[in-house]
Every structure is written in structure tokens, then in C-alpha cells.
Image: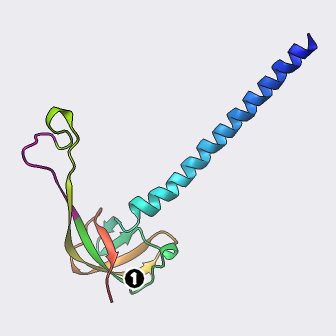
Amino acid sequence: MTLIRNQKLLVGYLFSIAFILVGALIISSCASMKGYYHAKIMKGSIIETHDSSIYLCIGKKDGAAVGQEFDVYKTIVTYPPAIPSPRVGPRGSQVTPTFQRESTGRVRITKILDEHFAEATIISGKAEKNSIVELSAP
């Protein structure tokens, strides 16, 4: 009888340990997804505009420096014209949009805010929230 009781306790402990490990794995995945989102999705985006200030998702960690100039682009998404819904084609097939970048202006970094963000000003054209910036060629 004690053998069966000990086996049940062991199985209970193993399930508890497995549950804790799975929880730790999920939590660490969420933390690394934040880094992934910043590095692959947000990086190079204009995240805010206020008066004459433009706020970029580029900072110390990305090698940003005061005085650097960036080209500003707006992304234009186009779907085939014959398809009424932008995501689903004939008989439910997936439709692939085309993407184009349209140059809208240039900005210059005036202040590094921290390792992820910088403040800039427009030096030509316009720069809107959600536009993309790319380091200008020298």
C-alpha cells in the first residue's frame, strides 16, 4: 500500500515540476517576443509626432547618433482590383497584396532618448506616424 502511495506522490511531484517548467517556458517566450516585436516590427518606425518633433523607434542600441539623417517612406498596399475582398480571392483562395514604398521626406536625429528611441526633426518633405525611416546613404 505504501508503494502505491509513494508512486502517486512521485507522479504528483512530476506533474507539478512539469507544470512549473511549462509556465516558465511560456513566460520566457512572451519576454523574448517583446524583443522580437521591437527588433523586427517596430524598429525604424515613426511612433509619434508632436508639433515639430518626430519620435523614432531607433535608439542607442541600434547605433543611432545625433545628426544622422533618415529617409522617410510611406508604405502603399495594393490588392488585385478584380477581387472585392482584400484578403480572400475566388473560392476562398488567399490573395497576396503588393507593397510599394513612397518617399515622403527626410528627418535628422536631434536627441537620443534611450536605447530604443530617438527624437528627430523634419528637414524636408513630411513625416507621419507609422511611416518607415531608413538611414540615408552618405
Disc 1 residue crowd, few under 14, some 14–19, many 20+, Cα 10 Å: some
Seen from the viewer's position, the closer of residues 3 and 103 is: 3
Q: Quadrant of the N terminus?
A: top right
Q: x, y (%) of residue 45?
A: 35, 66
2 left or right of 70 in image: right
Q: Quadrant of the C terminus?
A: bottom left
Q: x, y (%) of residue 98?
A: 19, 56
Residue 77 lies in the magenta-colored region: yes
Which residue of the protein is positioned furthest toward the top in this rendering? 1
The amino acid pointed to by label 1 is: Thr
Query: Residue shown at 52%/73% (left/top)?
Result: 61
> Which quadrant would residue 4 be assigned to in this image?
top right
Query: Residue shown at 32%/85% (left/top)?
Result: 137
Q: Is residue 36 above or below residue 109?
A: above
Seen from the viewer's position, the closer of residues 43 and 113 is: 43
Q: Which residues are magenta?
A: 75-85
The residue where tag 1 is placed is: 110
